[in-house]
């Protein structure tokens, strides 16, 4: 099967970006680069090896799950249906957090999923450490695998299995320079309307409750006691949630700054007591 034939197959399967996905598949399965596909457009790749991937893609399964990994902030992150697929918008959150954290900072990350956020931050800041919280043990194990595979020591990134919505924030003495999260923020009623690819991702990583704000409400109401003086919250938000976040911050007496993503959409909230 040639590159052109594979592009046609993926397009027929419903892919919105067949050229990009073909490059990912060929790189993963055959080690082919973009230059290889341009220099040798008629090269025949093993159809029998490609057909299972084509069938999976035709069923709506995201290409990242088929390949089993995604590049995120220069890190290779293993992904499975147990975690949300890391996206470019979240890379912006990592960049901002890395810039804002003070020297030798210690931060808390909630709803870690694949562990991509703390791994990216710690990979670029060798003076920083983190505690990351994940609800599901199988997903926490995936995050630990990604931590180890990217050369981050467990002494720098401690991944614990706990519920961020019920975590007792009043016990213990540890305080953090920042509390960071890309929590579930999609309104429950919107989830059935999402693309078939997104619906393959874990429901619990998407559903932010009736108004999409259940996690932000919990974090801003209960987690302030875990911040050091001068500390901050940094959250990824939905493109249409800036006003709701600002109202929530006014309710709890926080200052809020909204930053836009690469598409010009509201995406990151920096919140300070």
Image (spheres, rainbow, N blue to C red):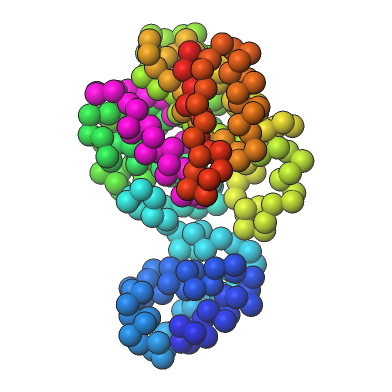
Does the stretch in magenta take in 8? no
| Label total for image | 0
Does the stretch in magenta take in 101? yes
| x and y percentages locating residue 269 in the rendered image | 51, 30
Instruction: State which quadrant residue 176 falls in.
Output: top left
| x and y percentages locating residue 10 in the rendered image | 57, 75
| x and y percentages locating residue 272 in the rendered image | 46, 17
Q: Is residue 103 above or below residue 94?
A: above
In this view, the residue farthest toward the right is 189
Residue in the image at 69% along x and 52% along y: 194
Q: Is residue 163 above or below residue 61?
A: above
| x and y percentages locating residue 129 in the rendered image | 30, 28
Residue in the image at 38% along x and 81% along y: 37
Lateral position of residue 260 relative to residue 205, left or right: left
Instruction: State which quadrant residue 35 falls in.
Output: bottom left
Residue in the image at 58% along x and 80% along y: 9
Lateral position of residue 141 relative to residue 148, left or right: right
Q: Can residue 175 be seen from the camera position used here?
A: no
The magenta segment is 85-112
Residue in the image at 64% along x and 28% along y: 243
Lateral position of residue 152 relative to residue 212, left or right: left
Q: Can residue 181 be seen from the camera position used here?
A: yes
């Amino acid at each position: 099967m040639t590159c052109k034939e594979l592009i046609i197959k993926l397009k027929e399967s419903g892919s919105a970006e067949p050229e990009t996905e073909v490059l990912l598949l060929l790189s993963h399965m055959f080690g082919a680069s973009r230059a290889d596909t341009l220099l040798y457009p008629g090269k025949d790749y093993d159809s029998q090896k490609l057909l299972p991937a084509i069938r999976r893609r035709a069923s709506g399964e995201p290409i990242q799950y088929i390949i089993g990994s995604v590049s995120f902030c220069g890190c290779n992150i293993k992904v499975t249906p147990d975690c949300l697929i890391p996206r470019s918008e979240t890379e912006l959150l990592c960049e901002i957090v890395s810039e804002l954290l003070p020297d030798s900072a210690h931060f808390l990350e909630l709803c870690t999923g694949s562990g991509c956020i703390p791994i990216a931050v710690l990979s670029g800041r060798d003076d920083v450490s983190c505690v990351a919280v994940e609800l599901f043990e199988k997903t926490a194990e995936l995050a630990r695998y990604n931590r180890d595979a990217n050369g981050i020591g467990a002494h720098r990134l401690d991944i614990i299995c706990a519920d961020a919505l019920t975590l007792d924030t009043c016990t213990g003495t540890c305080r953090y320079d920042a509390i960071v999260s890309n929590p579930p923020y999609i309104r429950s009623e919107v989830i059935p309307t999402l693309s078939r690819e997104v619906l393959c991702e874990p429901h619990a990583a998407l559903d932010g409750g009736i108004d999409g704000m259940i996690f932000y409400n919990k974090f801003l109401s209960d987690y302030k006691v875990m911040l050091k003086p001068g500390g901050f919250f940094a959250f990824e938000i939905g493109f249409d949630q800036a006003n709701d976040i600002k109202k929530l911050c006014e309710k709890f007496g926080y200052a809020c700054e909204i930053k836009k993503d690469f598409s010009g959409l509201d995406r990151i909230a920096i919140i300070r007591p």
